[in-house]
Amino acid sequence: MNRSGFTLLELIFVIVVLGVVASLGSDIITKVYEGYIIQRAQYRADIKTELALEQIANRLRNAIPGTIIARPSAMSTTAVDVTSISGVDYPFLQWVGRDYDSFIDFNRSTDRRPGWSGFADVNACSKTTIATPGSNLLLADQVIKNLSNNFTNLNSAYVYFAGVYDSQGHPIGHPVNLVDSSHLSFDISGPKTVTERYWLAWSSYALSVENGDLYLYYMFSPRYGQIQTSAMKTLLLRNVSNFRYRAEAEGSIRIKLCKKERYGNGSNDFVISCKEKVVY
């Protein structure tokens, strides 16, 4: 019984077709994989940028009004109000943060008073003492110690009274000492302007891009305009390609942050993620 088979020409044709199909298939697979690598890098960049912006916003939301300033560098003595610049030539952003943690904290078992109430009894205050009924300043002192790992306490804090400014329009902060659970004493003598509302602060904060990385400075004097000579700092985001900010309506700050994320070894093998957030 005779059986017909492939001729040599037919076999060569089949091999050529299979080679073309394999070549096209490998090219498609390579492009799909490259697309996956790029998308994964873009996703990582987006997530990291968004998380860094959220950390910035959480701290900047607690800035005491009027204390946000900008500097051309970390150690520069030049400081300008953030409302007068665009952030292009001032990459160092600084502010005094109110002590939000002890403001919302209270001893649930025995005392419902917050660490500090934010209200002063003007009639009971004097040139040397702040009376703040409704506060549990002993609790605030403990919270500050816990958050700073015993680096500082309430005796290193400042009080800012709402609507009180110096002749140049800068907020005035007063260093204070703990007296008892509802009284603070001024650390500096002399006449003071006391108003009903106040903010308690124990640290300033700052953002700075250094060698392409974004750092947060913290745990330095809450005095307005203080240069961070002894601050601690932590890395927020690596490979930052752009950090800009500007003041907007009603005291809000718009921050733009861009990050590079590599996906290969080539000079152009990177993606850029840019995010913006408005902080009120």
Image (cartoon, helix red, strand yellow):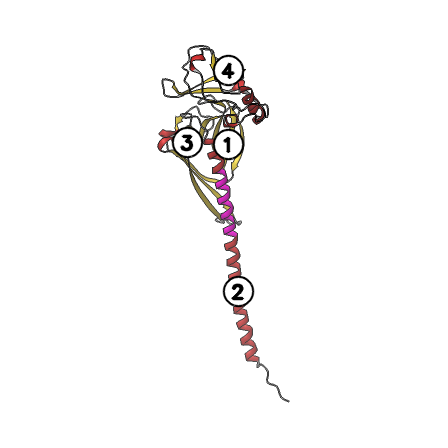
Query: Does the CB distance between marks 4 and 2 fall below 8 Å?
Result: no
For the residue pair 37 and 262, the one nearer the viewer reads as 37
Q: In the image, what residue type sits under mark 2?
A: Gly
Is 48 placed above or below 192 here? Answer: below
Mark on residue 90?
A: 3
Dot 1 or dot 4: first in sequence order is 4
Does the magenta portion include 49?
yes
The location of residue 15, given as percent across then percent down, is 56, 73
| Kind of residue sitting beneath label 4 | His
Picture coordinates of residue 11, whole percent (x, y): 57, 77
Q: Would you name the residue on which mark 2 appears?
A: 25
Tag 4 secondary structure: strand
Magenta stretch: give its range.
Answer: 37-52
Would you say the residues marked 2 and 3 are in contact, meaning their CB atoms lie under 8 Å apart?
A: no
- Local secondary structure at mark 1: strand
| Position of the N terminus by quadrant | bottom right
Image x and y of residue 161, in percent: 42, 20
The residue that disc 4 covers is 183
Q: Residues within 10 Å of mark 4 (few under 14, many from 20)?
A: many
Q: CA distance from mark 2 to mark 3?
A: 52 Å
Visible in this render: residue 218? yes
> Of the residues tagged 1 and 4, which is closer to the observer?
4
- Characterize the local packing of mark 2: few (<14), some (14-19) or many (20 or more) Cα atoms within 10 angstroms: few
Image depth: mark 2 or mark 1 in front: 1
Query: Depth-wise, is mark 4 or mark 3 nearer the camera?
Result: 4
Which dot marks residue 279?
none
